[in-house]
Amino acid sequence: MGYFLDERCGVHHLVDQEFEHNRQSTLKCLENSRYGGVRSAFENAYSHFDSQPQDTKVAVRSIFEALEILTKLMAKTDKLNKSAVENMLEPLALRQCGTDETARRAVHKMFLGFAEWVDAIHFYRHGQGQSEPVAPSIDFAVYALSSGTGFLRWLLTIDSNELNAGS
């Protein structure tokens, strides 16, 4: 894994161009003041991933936190868990599918995967009951950040569509 300098001379781990593109395009989606807390947690995730030494545990926890904050903005819940994904977020996405049964089936399957992602991340969000903290590997952190960023972008679009439909 290499490094690159951003336009402000910040040093970042270079996973690949797609990883960086997803980070930057998601930051653009987070410009609305409604998403200030989401953006802060999102930036924190990548900041800890870029730190020396890398703090993959905080990076993974922070991408989860970004998604949890957005979930709290979108739905009446106090936490992001499998139930919130299936019972609060998925119905919002399904509403946007209208009567397109193919889209509805695909969205349902994607949200089943998101619910499993949420459950998997909980292993790193909570203490493991060991004397030494267990941090995810760099490869796991890259996947968690990449997939979490993808879910975040999709939920931001769903939220934006819901807000626009309500106005």
Image (tube, rainbow, N blue to C red):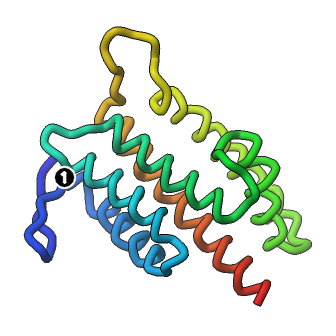
Q: Is residue 72 left or right of residue 63?
A: right
Residue occupying the point 47% across, 76% down = 29
Query: 113 or 73: nearer the eye?
Result: 73
How packed mark 1 is, by other alpha carbons closer than 10 Å (few <14, some 14-19, many 20 or more), is some
| Amino acid type at mark 1 | His
Name, please, the residue furthest toward the top: 131
Residue occupying the point 35% across, 44% down = 59
Name, please, the residue furthest toward the front: 78
Query: 28 or 79: nearer the eye?
Result: 79
What is the tally of numbered marks visible in this picture?
A: 1
Where residue 112 appears, x then y in whole percent? 72, 44
Q: Is residue 62 left or right of residue 48?
A: right
Where residue 152 appears, x then y in whole percent? 53, 61
Residue 106 visible in this rendered orientation of the protein? no
Relative vertical location of residue 147 with respect to residue 116 in this rendering, above or below = below
Disc 1 on helix, strand or loop?
strand
- The quarter in which the C terminus is drawn is bottom right
Residue occupying the point 14% across, 76% down = 7
Relative vertical location of residue 111 with respect to residue 123 in this rendering, above or below = below
Pointer 1: what residue?
Answer: 13
Q: Quadrant of residue 46?
A: bottom left
Name, please, the residue furthest toward the bottom: 167
Residue occupying the point 39% across, 62% down = 40
Residue 26 visible in this rendered orientation of the protein? yes
Where residue 12 appears, x then y in whole percent? 17, 57
Relative vertical location of residue 144 with respect to residue 57 in this rendering, above or below = below
Where residue 159 appears, x then y in whole percent? 66, 72
